[in-house]
Image (cartoon, rainbow, N blue to C red):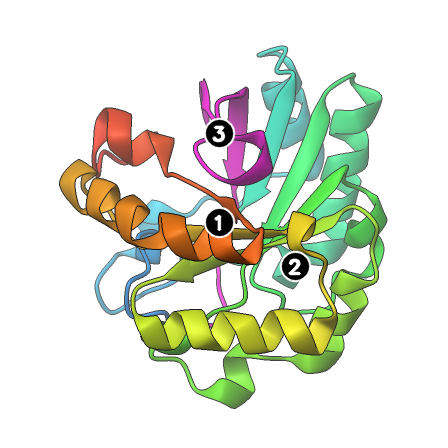
Amino acid sequence: MFGPTIQGEGPSAGRPAVFVRLGACNLACAWCDTAYTWDGDRYDLSRELQIRSTGDVAREVLALRPSLVVLTGGEPALQSREAARLARAITDGGSAIELETSGTVPLGALANAVRLVVTSPKLSSSAVLDRARLRWGVLAEIAALPHAVFKFVVQSPTDLREADEIVARLGLSPGRVWLMPEATHAAALADGLRALAPHAVSRGWSLSSRLQVAVWGDERGR
């Protein structure tokens, strides 16, 4: 858990927020900037991750009196039952909660326990096999949710073409789609935003920065 900070990405960018980052992921994206949640080859996961009760996490988060809580990972849907319990407890405590997911694991009860589902289908630059990163049945279920949006992390023109294909296949309206550059440093972020801006405008999609990178760079826990 970290915060209060700001939500740096997507529809709620700029809002004060507290983050709950869950461990474990079913993917291994080449550019992942939170690999300490799942990569046991590079990180000592016995030190990086803690087993916590859902009730304790909810109480600790709500003690900060956040207006917004972001549930992220790793992949939170891998723990969907307890994540849904956590989301309901946070909502009952008076805070809004949003979910960040790759769209590769069914959400179950978690789908309707949060106010917003921000889904980031992984594109070719992630270096994850297509059959692992594009689970069309799961993506279609999420696309059917009225409170779901899609955010594409873009590194190359190939990624853009693939984003177009996914949006078309899922029948997403332009107002539900965000483009965001892959960047962990401010200079690369600025370059990426300049490169993506005309593509977002021409499609009627939204452009997402990574405000945490612009403000704090690659500092962990921001």
Residues packed near mark 2 inside 10 Å, few (<14), some (14 to 19) or many (20 plus): many
Q: Is residue 33 left or right of residue 85?
A: left
Magenta segment: 1-27
Residue 74 visible, this angle: no
State if disc 3 and disc 2 touch (CB < 8 Å): no
**Marks 3, 1: nearer the viewer:** 1
- Residue plotted at (19% across, 37% down): 186
Q: Residue 143 bears which disc, if any? A: none
Identify the element where label 3 is drawn.
loop
Indicate whether residue 102 is drawn in magenta. Answer: no
Image location (x, y in percent) of residue 66 = 61, 15
User: For this rendering, which residue is in front, 1 or 12?
Assistant: 12
Q: Quadrant of the C terminus?
A: top left
Residue at 65%, 16% in the rendered image: 67
Residue designated by label 3: 7
Picture quadrant of residue 109: bottom right
Q: In what element is the residue under mark 2?
A: helix
In the rendered image, residue 27, in percent from the top left (x then y), is placed at: 45, 72
Position of residue 21 measured from the top left corner of the image (x, y, whole percent): 50, 42
Q: Is residue 22 above or below residue 127?
A: above
Q: Which residue is mark 1?
A: 201
Contact flag, marks 1 and 2 (Cβ < 8 Å): no
Q: Which residue is mark 2?
A: 77
* Quarter location, residue 38: bottom left
Of mark 1 and mark 2, the one earlier in the sequence is 2
Q: Farthest residue in the left direction? A: 187
Res. 70 visible in picture: yes
